[in-house]
């Protein structure tokens, strides 16, 4: 097959985009990973002179999250944060090297929010739901709430998140709550990934819908109403018998897709857990 140059051009464009994403501070781990880990785990040197009194790394991270929540991650910059905090931009660099490392800190902070009511010491005695079903439901609900509070979480690639205390605490709590399922360790991780993927997929759909309203100025009702004449003709044509025969409440906003999907996932896990217990008894 002849090469007209488009393949090479596409590859170059992809590489350029990937490089930009890795250097503009919008991808976890795209900065100085060693420095991010030092800051996350509290092993890095603290500024000894120069910064404005009262300025702390905690305040910088809090301000960055507030800006991202209100305007999106693209609005977060060292210059913008210096304005928000009433300090010089160079003062911020004494605490954090740049936006890439700051993102690592922001992620660990927000990932820890659902755990805020739990003890700081992972080894401390703390209540773990005896029923793993209750644990999955509670953690899925908390994850959805967190994604709704911080929509920018769904805009970034978290496949290579720099792991800090909050991320590890969350995984530790999840594993402890699911241990009673009696599954193999890789399967327990699979349960967590499956539930998180379901929650994130639903949250992304809801977030995209809200974003569409903001971008177009059309409400969901106005958007679908504009299509009504065409859809009605299509349904009467006989070409779509399954859709034409669906009940009027099929797409009702009152139907709880989150609860429905989560219940079905838990029911599926119950089958696996029962099979393992039966196999263990037989053995």
Image: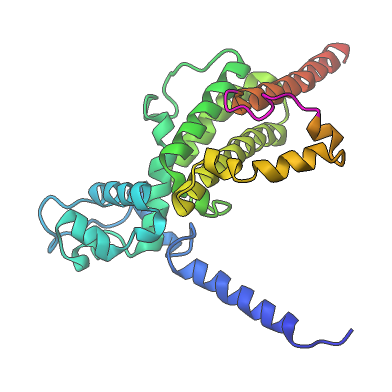
Image vertical order of residue 129 relative to residue 56, above or below: above
Q: Nearer the viewer, residue 240 or 106?
A: 240
**Can you tell which quarter of the image residue 126 is in?**
top left
Could you tell me what secondary structure mostly forms the magenta stretch? Answer: loop
Q: Does residue 204 appear to the left or right of 6 in the view shown?
A: left
Q: Does residue 13 appear to the left or right of 187 in the view shown?
A: left
Based on the picture, tell me whether residue 264 belongs to the magenta stretch.
Answer: no
| Image quarter (top left, top right, bottom left or bottom right) of the N terminus | bottom right
Q: Does residue 267 appear to the left or right of 211 in the view shown?
A: right
The residue lying at 40 percent from left, 56 percent from top is 73
Q: Nearer the viewer, residue 88 or 171?
A: 88
What stretch of residues is rendered in magenta?
Answer: 245-254
Q: Does residue 4 appear to the left or right of 81 in the view shown?
A: right
The residue lying at 38 percent from left, 43 percent from top is 109
> Residue 82's x, y, as percent?
21, 61
> Residue 75's x, y, as percent?
35, 59
| Image quarter (top left, top right, bottom left or bottom right) of the C terminus | top right
**Can you tell which quarter of the image residue 98 is in?**
bottom left
């Amino acid at each position: 097959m002849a090469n007209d140059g488009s393949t090479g051009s596409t590859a170059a464009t992809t590489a350029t985009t990937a490089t930009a994403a890795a250097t503009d501070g919008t991808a976890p781990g795209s900065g100085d990973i060693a420095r991010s880990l030092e800051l996350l785990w509290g092993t890095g040197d603290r500024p000894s002179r120069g910064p404005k009194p009262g300025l702390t790394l905690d305040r910088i991270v809090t301000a960055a999250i507030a800006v991202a929540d209100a305007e999106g991650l693209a609005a977060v910059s060292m210059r913008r944060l210096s304005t928000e905090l009433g300090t010089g931009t160079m003062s911020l660099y004494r605490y954090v090297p740049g936006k890439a490392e700051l993102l690592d800190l922001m992620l660990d902070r927000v990932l820890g929010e659902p755990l805020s009511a739990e003890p700081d010491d992972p080894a401390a005695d703390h209540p773990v739901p005896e029923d793993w079903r209750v644990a999955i439901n509670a953690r899925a609900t908390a994850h959805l709430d967190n994604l709704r509070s911080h929509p920018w979480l769904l805009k970034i690639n978290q496949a290579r998140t720099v792991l800090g205390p909050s991320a590890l605490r969350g995984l530790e709590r999840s594993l402890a709550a699911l241990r009673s399922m009696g599954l193999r360790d890789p399967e327990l991780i699979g349960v967590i990934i499956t539930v998180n993927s379901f929650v994130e997929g639903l949250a992304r759909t809801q977030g995209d819908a809200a974003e569409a309203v903001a971008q177009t100025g059309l409400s969901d009702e106005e958007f679908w109403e504009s299509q009504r004449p065409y859809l009605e003709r299509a349904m009467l044509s006989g070409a779509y018998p399954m859709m034409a025969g669906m009940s009027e409440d099929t797409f009702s906003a009152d139907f709880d897709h989150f609860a429905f999907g989560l219940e079905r996932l838990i029911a599926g896990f119950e089958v696996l857990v029962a099979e393992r217990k039966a196999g263990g008894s037989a053995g």
